[in-house]
Amino acid sequence: MTAYVLTIVFLLLLAPLLLSFIKMIKMILLFKKPVSIFQGYRNFSKLMEKETIISEESSSMTRYAPFLVLSPLLVTMFFLPPVVQGAFYVSFVDAFTITGLISLSTFFLMLLGLDSASAFGGMGSSREAFIAALVEPAMVLTIFSVSMMAGDLGVGQAGVNLAAHFPKEHMASFLFAGISFYILLLAENGRIPIDNPETHLELTMVHEAMILDLTGIYLALVESASSVKFVIFASLFVSLFVPFGLEYAAPVAGFLFVLKLFAVALSVAILEVSTAKLRLFKVPNLLGIAIVFAFLSLITFYVLGA
Amino acid sequence: MHMFQFDTLSMVFTALIFLGVIPNLFYSHGYLPHIERKAHYQLHYFAFVISMIGVVVSANALMFLLFWELMSLTSWQLILTEAKEKKTIDAASFYFIMTHFGFVFLLLFFLIVSDGDLEMGFSAMHTVSMKFAYPTLLFFFLLLGFLSKAGAVPLHVWLPYAHPEAPSPVSALMSGVMLKVAIYGMFRFLFDVLYPWPLEWGIVILVIGALSSLVGVLYALSEHDIKALLANHSIENIGIILMGFGMGMIFESMHLQVLSSFAFIAALFHTFNHMSFKSLLFMGAGSVLHQTHTKNIEKYGGLIKSMPVTALTFLLASISISALPPTNGFLSEWMIFQSMLSSSHLDNMSLKLAIPFAIFALAMTGGLAIACFVKAYGITFLGLHRSSNAKYAHEVNGLMRTGMLLMAAVVISLMLFTPFYIGWFDKVLVQAGHLSAYAKIFPEGIWHMHSAGMHGGVVSPLILLAALIGITGLMMFAYRALRVKERIHRTWGCGYRTSAKTQYTATGFAGPIRRFFNWLYKPDEHFVKETVAGHKSKFSTSHYEVHVTPLFEKTLYRSVSKAANAISYWVYRLAHFEQTRYAAMIFNLMLLVLFSYRIFAHTFSWATFVLEGIVMIISIKVLIIGEKR
């Protein structure tokens, strides 16, 4: 139980660190003076101290939605696979529910974008809706495939199963599902090539456009929601597709897990530096690849194995 | 002779009708002052309700058909309550034709299975149908009869016309309850009369379901008439119900009994859920329409400030219809997903490989539904008023509010008391001679819902709800405790002054998705731009509008009517020729009959086929068409 609570608190604390780490790596690779790895915490504390300005046009939605953007993701944190052996995990929520909770958070984020009546918010919401609608099928199919290989749809149990016995005979299916999930990780978290998290140019922004009118704690809530989302996706990726190291003693296993999270962040950073952002109407092509790989994973599973 | 029966299936659907009707009564009563022909409306309203109850409790074909027809006629009259525009009358006649198109097939079905005795009970029909040589024909009669009422592809075209024209309480009732009566018909006659189902039937229903759900949600997205949008979502949800139903039939014919019960329970549960949230959505749309006097979403905006009760209930229903946890809509869609994931139990490889495509369709539908309801809710209730009508809107009267709140209570009860409802649906299946799945779904008490398949998922709606409310409440409490300074001020809109005209519109919101599905929509775009002095990029005013005509209507319906027109015109033209041409036509018809007899009855040879074809063409050309003038 302590291990369980500690893991959640630890992952929450790690969340801003990972995003700052990505930023830092990117700046190093671009020969800029890197930001501190603790910039995420600084931003958070700065926003917490600020006064909250609510735009004149907005309604009560702006007062409630930021909480509802963050809380489904916080609930999801409780359902992640265990990091160390023997850690208690909650097994009563399956991967579908997690998809649903993430969608719930996105739903309120999109409403938040439409609430302040600014053209930017609407634009961001519209684009987010477009991307999210295409992410959904790929996500569900990938989950379906992984759940069959892991022998359980509940992500907690699936993570444990995979760590205990990795089905090497389904390596091909695993690889396909992994590629698909990695693309989804990029899409859901608004990373390049889907969305550029660092820009404030109307042509390119998706996530930032929705939250342009937020300030203070509300902004802090939504920003932490996006970092929590990254941690969720990264740790799901790590425990479902690189499920090794759970058998070691708790400190080693924990350390390995963090190392793997940072490896994912590093890969995202390298990818962001080396690719350009796609045009919005090219995004379906990338997500189409995710969908195709998810199908391929299922088909190889059925045809080769089982 | 039994006229009525009250078995579990009938009672479940009677309960569905009552759950849908009681809140609607309040709403309808509140709406009444705005209807001119009150007596006409009230009479048909109550007759409509009684006829629906009659359909679900009738025990023989005669009663069934009587109430079914009464239901069609009263709802047709209700659409005509406010028949001022030609559009309403057109929609009503379209509905009239479609519903009787279905009725004909139901009549054919009953004439065959009842062996001429229309007062025969349903179980007696089973023995007759067993002897009938072509059960698939009966199945297709049922499909055409019930799905034309339920609004599944390709018989869905009347819904987006008829539902918007009816008064809002009636659209809530028609979409929420009447479509479900058709689903009742599917359950009743597939279980009682046509029981051992071949595998293909289930696949047909699954495919129809998948198509309906995608088509419904895609056209809903491109719709700007709020009631037509909701009507299109009915098509989608009927599709989802049919997907559950089809999975149930597939599992049943593969002898996976518990999984089959699970899928049927999912379909029944979604039937209830769709009744609750779609009624609520239509009521909310009705309130908005009543205040703003327009059905066009682009003319709303900012209504959350002036109509909080409507906005809140509409939000609840939107979350539920978008299948977001922990609402009831999510739970039933979760069950349908779980039953499709259990397809790995099937030992038919091609089915195993095909069902992921249905999963894909359902997931895509879910994603697009979220987009659609963000659009519907965001453009209607959030932002600034987009027209002066919206500006002067205020909350509707107490009775209408009561109706909406009661319906919201039904939605919440379906969410909170899921195990109770599922236990009930389980009884329906047990009574129909299927295995019970309740113990599989709730093996360890009512807190956790399990999938019936191996390696299936678990979800615990109540714990999830409690966790969400708890965490959100804690955070809000912390926010209060921090005593943050708040200021309401103009925020930076990138230098532009925010006004009603600079907001995103519904057209703009659906823009990316519409553009992506352009190959399907093939929209008519109207773009008028007053350019200044010949500059392409400088203009004083511009206006952009998009209209999407559904593909099915364009291809299937209009081309059929075009072909009928062309043929009748040709016949009409022939009728003006002299008698020798008639003689020539008869001569040619005889030639055709003789030639076809030769070709089909004797050994087929290409040489004679070609020769006789040439003879036919020449004689038609010379004798009938004659020389061109």
Image (cartoon, coloured by chain):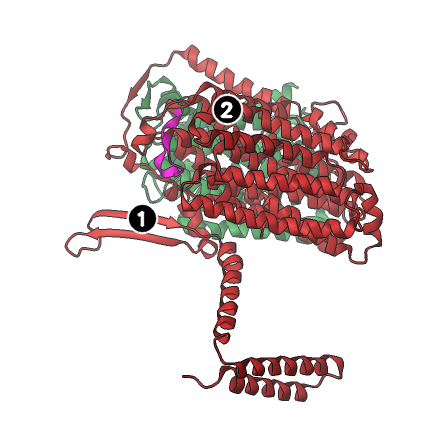
Chain colours: A green, B red
Q: Amino acid at mark 2?
A: His
Give coordinates of residue A219: x percent, y percent. 39, 26
Q: Chain of mark 1?
A: B
Residue B465 quadrant: top right
Nearest to the observer: residue A111 or residue A20: A111
How many discs mark residues in the rendered view? 2
Q: Which residue is mark 2?
A: B29
Dot 2 falls on a residue whose secondary structure is helix
| Residue shown at the point (19%, 50%) measured from the top left | B538
Give coordinates of residue B418: x percent, y percent. 67, 26
Nearest to the observer: residue A51 or residue B275: B275
Mark 2 against mark 1, which lies toward the viewer?
A: 2
Question: Taking B371 as reference, is A5 above or below it?
Answer: above
Give coordinates of residue A271: x percent, y percent. 46, 46
Nearest to the observer: residue B14 or residue B369: B14
| Residue shown at the point (45%, 43%) measured from the top left | B88
User: In what quadrant of the picture does the C terminus of chain B appear?
Assistant: bottom left
| Residue shown at the point (45%, 27%) measured from the top left | A224
Neighbor class of circle 1 (other Cα within 10 Å; few <14, some 14-19, many 20+) is few
Check if residue B23 falls in the magenta segment.
Answer: no
| Residue shown at the point (36%, 28%) measured from the top left | B302
Neighbor class of circle 2 (other Cα within 10 Å; few <14, some 14-19, many 20+) is some
Give coordinates of residue B375: x percent, y percent. 43, 37
Q: Which residue is mark 1?
A: B544
Highlighted range, magenta = B292-304
**Horizontal relation, residue B568 to residue A79: left or right:** left
Q: Amino acid at mark 1?
A: Tyr
Question: Taking A71 as reference, is B300 above or below it?
Answer: below
